[in-house]
Image (cartoon, rainbow, N blue to C red):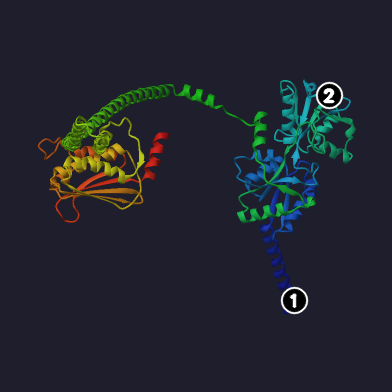
Amino acid sequence: MIKKFQQWWFCVCLLISGMMALAQDVEDALTIAILAPMGAQETLESWQGFQTLLASHLDRSVVVLPVTFEEFQTVAKDASVDLLIANQTAFLSIFPEVKWRWLASLDQNSALFNPESAIGSAIVVRKSSQIRTLEDLKGQRVTAVSKDALGGFLLGYKAIYNAGLSAPDDYFIEMTGFPIERGIFLVESGLAAAAILPTCLLETLGQSGLLNVADFRVLNEVQGGRCRSSTPLSYHWSLAALPSVDEALAQKIVQILWQNTDPALTTWQTPSSLGEVYAMKRFAGLIEIDETLWETFVRLANEYKLGLLAIILLMLVLAMKHLWLTYVARKRRFALESTYHRLHDYEALLSKADRMNILGEVASGIGHELNQPLMAIRNYAEGTLLGIERGKAPNQFIQPLSRIVTQVEQCSAIIKNLQAWVKPKTTQQFEWFNFHDFMNRMLEIIRLQTKNRVAITLDINCEQKIYTVVSVLEQVMMNSLLNAVQAGATEIIIEASCHQDFYKILISDNGHGFTQSELDAPFVPFRTSKPTGLGLGLVICERLMTAVGGKFRIDHRKDGEMGACVRIILSSGSQQEVKDENSHRG
């Protein structure tokens, strides 16, 4: 008794285990809904290779579910399957309600009636018919598969439209539905004049013995493909995954499909979009377009006339305000530009006045310096005249005449140096020049003015040339040196040093220096300690140096001795050349 009970219990457990395993297999199965235009049995046979390909590489079973067009829409919206295989028009019928992602588009399935991925429309009539062109279909009855069929309607519809016929004004269309071969049998029986068929369907039916291909004619036949077609070929079937398929599984499926090269198991390519089919259906009037953008604008304008009028008035007011503000800003800009130009002219006049003031200060020293060679020339000339009157030999006059020439050259050098400094500069051009030669000319003028009573030391520790406006540096240096002389300095030290990005000039003296109030606000116009000064020298120097990209600073001597220190900073030539070039380009 106990032994029989154990056997019975073992059978029950075995049955339960089998049912649980079966349930687990069903739960893990990958379900694929495939559109079946030729019927369920033929679809299962046509896609057996694809099913085998996936099942051999995935660790789960693969279930193929043939569906009609309506069933395809239902299972897609219910998400009761994992993968979808259909033509592009079927996918367009569930867009955008159903979310999916493309995996691949069919390249070749040798088991289908049209094994190629491309498809077209064959517009077929009886060979005995008088219809020989698409234009002859006017007033005739034409069958098609479905309004959503790409090869079975849309492509053929467009070809007939391009021939100048439009349904239902010029001919009549009857949708026969699935299976898709119904239309050609209506043509064969004389119940319809023509049928729009997917390419290769006519040849497949002929090979199966269901009809005689020689009894039919394809209108508007075009070259391309192994089957007769009335239109150019377009893409056809695609594979898509619903949200139930995770990313890892989707990537694995794509990898399996693209690695396969056996046409018996179907081959695939990168997925196509719905763009062309969408354009076809919209062209055929099968996609409802509520209104164009212009129609929307007109409707809204009629509904909200008052609001639109208020917006227009507000925009006009804002536009008028913008124009007024633009006018005021433009007027003020012109006024500011005019003021700026006047100030620039005044500054140039002040700079010129400052140079003339400096010239006046050095004029007495220059006059004294010229008097000496002139007196020597006079003495040599008078002595020569006296010798001539006394009848001396001509060779005795060579030495005094040579000395006269030397004194004249000295006077000429003094005058040329002064002219070069005083001569007004019509342009402010940057140029390269040697600072040592430049300072020698400056020192000659200063020594003339001071009659060599001030010891001037020049210390230049590099041979680098300076790139700046010569006249500006002349005026700034001359002003600084004369300020030192007028401050009672008996010793002036000029130091120049080269750095990577700048050139520094230091002018130190042993005069009375600057007061603290002058250092706190160094460049205040019309402030001076000189009885006849204008108080503009330092201001002009600072502005001139800023204009050429340099700096002008004043301070006490850093060594603790009494006196002033003027620091002049000039930008390096390379940087200034770049700025100068950019300004010319601008």
Disc 2 residue type (three-letter): Arg
At which x and y percent is residue 494?
A: 24, 49
Neighbour class for label 2 at 10 Å: few (<14), some, many (≥20)?
Answer: some
Return the residue found at the far bottom.
2
At which x and y percent is residue 134?
A: 78, 24
Q: Which residue is drawn at 40% across and 41% down?
A: 578
Mark 2 or mark 1, which is nearer to you?
Answer: 2
Dot 1 lies on which element?
helix
Q: Which of 237 and 302 is in front in this view?
A: 237
Residue 153 position (above or below residue 63): above
Q: Which of 338 and 173 is in front in this view?
A: 338
In this rendering, would 249 be left or right of 452?
right
Disc 1 residue type (three-letter): Lys
In this rendering, would 263 be left or right of 515?
right
In this rendering, would 528 be left or right of 110?
left
At which x and y percent is residue 460?
A: 29, 51
Q: Locate residue 311: give its quadrant.
A: top left
How many labels, in total? 2
Q: Mark 2 points at which residue?
A: 132
Q: Can residue 225 be seen in this view?
A: yes
Q: Residue at x 30, y 32 (%)?
A: 425
Q: Is disc 2 in contact with disc 1, using a CB cutoff of under 8 Å?
A: no
Q: In which quarter of the image is the N terminus?
A: bottom right
Q: Name the residue under label 1.
A: 4
Dot 2 lies on which element?
loop
Residue 81 position (above or below residue 5): above
